[in-house]
Image (spheres, rainbow, N blue to C red):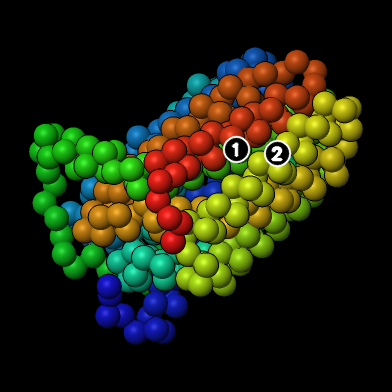
Amino acid sequence: MSDLSEPAKKILKSVLALTIASSSFAVQVFLPALPAVQKQFGVSAAVVQLTVSLPLIALAVSTLMWGILSDRYGRRPTMLAGLALFLIGTLACAVAPTIELLIAGRLVQAVGGAACVVISRAIVRDIYGRERAAAELASLIAIMVIGPMLAPIIGGVLVDTVGWRGSFEFIAVFLAGVLAYAGFRLAETNHQRLPIPDLTGIFLAYGRLVRSSDFMAYALQSAFMIGTFYVVLSAAPYAIITVMGYSATEYGLGFILSTVGYLSGNLIAQRYSQRVGIDRMIALALATALISTFATVALLMAGVWTLLAVFVPLTFMGIANGMSLPNANAGAVSVYPEMAGTASGLLSFLQNGIAALFAQVTGSVQDGTPHAFGLGMFVAAVLAVVSFYGPVRHKTLN
């Protein structure tokens, strides 16, 4: 663990909160613009959905790179390089004249944004122990969730007033500020640099993690829980704006409920993770996820197509994610502490790869109903339960 003073750790956490917020903010502020982008470029739903799913795949693959680079060259230089690339991609999106160039800009944006999540998790593991890391990750997410909570509202207002390009211009200004702040305040926490392994060494390192039932339980469970969230991000704009007839601004306002739920779950994790234990917190979260996603499916199948019918259950889904993810992340990167960066990279690869699959499939189904939206969440929640209890079912929850 790091010997940083408590004031220094607080400053470092403020930097990490902003860097993680920038990544999730960039995704969510753009989502209310999907129907407008589809209309302007005259493309199908499947094509416009590539602006969400392909960047998730790029993010997933690039996390493998950022984790290893941060183990070798340090957390600070790799984080700053990622933020700079993130800003370049965002500026490219703001001026993209075609859907192809918009997708390309989103890919660059995603590669840079991947560094924010991977390296932040590794830094937290550098300076805290296993159980404390879960609480600190929850605290970190609670601090940064204010930005993503406002993102759909800001994105919806920008779409309804200045057009969809305004969201990228807004992100660019935000990122420029984050990059400047990180340049002045981000401290280095990796003081035991590992050499970059050759191709065989890389496969051996990742193979060691994949063979660990503990790592895979935490990683897959968190990946499917994130999958429930990305079903919302990719399919909800069509379901709420196009099918139900609400405006982009109303969608953004409704999204506040689910984000408040996510914040509440993080606060619960922050307060009780050390006392209750990582696995028990995850178990409570999974039960909440199953109940809330089943309620969503039941309401939509019954023809209750209203904002409250969607976002009230999603509030509890947000609580489940907020409780689960900090604990799963802390558990995964603590299996082999000496490989925290590599583990964080593989964790993000699995999380974003599975999220991309759910986003593309559910976001591409436009059948005049919101049913795919509800069913997609429920399937992801069921898979989260199966993936967690499979590897750990013979163990006593800690």
- For numbered disc 2, what is the local secondary structure? helix
Give the position of the C terminus as an image quadrant.
bottom left
Q: Which residue is mark 1?
A: 381
**Amino acid, disc 1:** Ala
Judging depth in this view, the residue of 290 and 226 nearest the camera is 290
Callout 2–callout 1 Cβ contact below 8 Å: yes
Q: Is residue 362 left or right of residue 314?
A: left
Q: Residue 40: where, in percent of width, then height?
A: 69, 23
Where does the image place residue 83, in percent across and percent down from the top left? 40, 52
Report how far apart the C-alphas of labels 2 and 1 lie in the structure: 7 Å
Q: Is residue 221 visible?
A: yes
Q: Nearer the viewer, residue 52 or 273?
A: 273
What residue do we see at 51% from left, 36% from top?
386
Vertical relation: 181 (above or below) 366: below
Residue that label 2 marks: 293
Q: Describe the element under mark 1 as helix, strand or loop.
A: helix
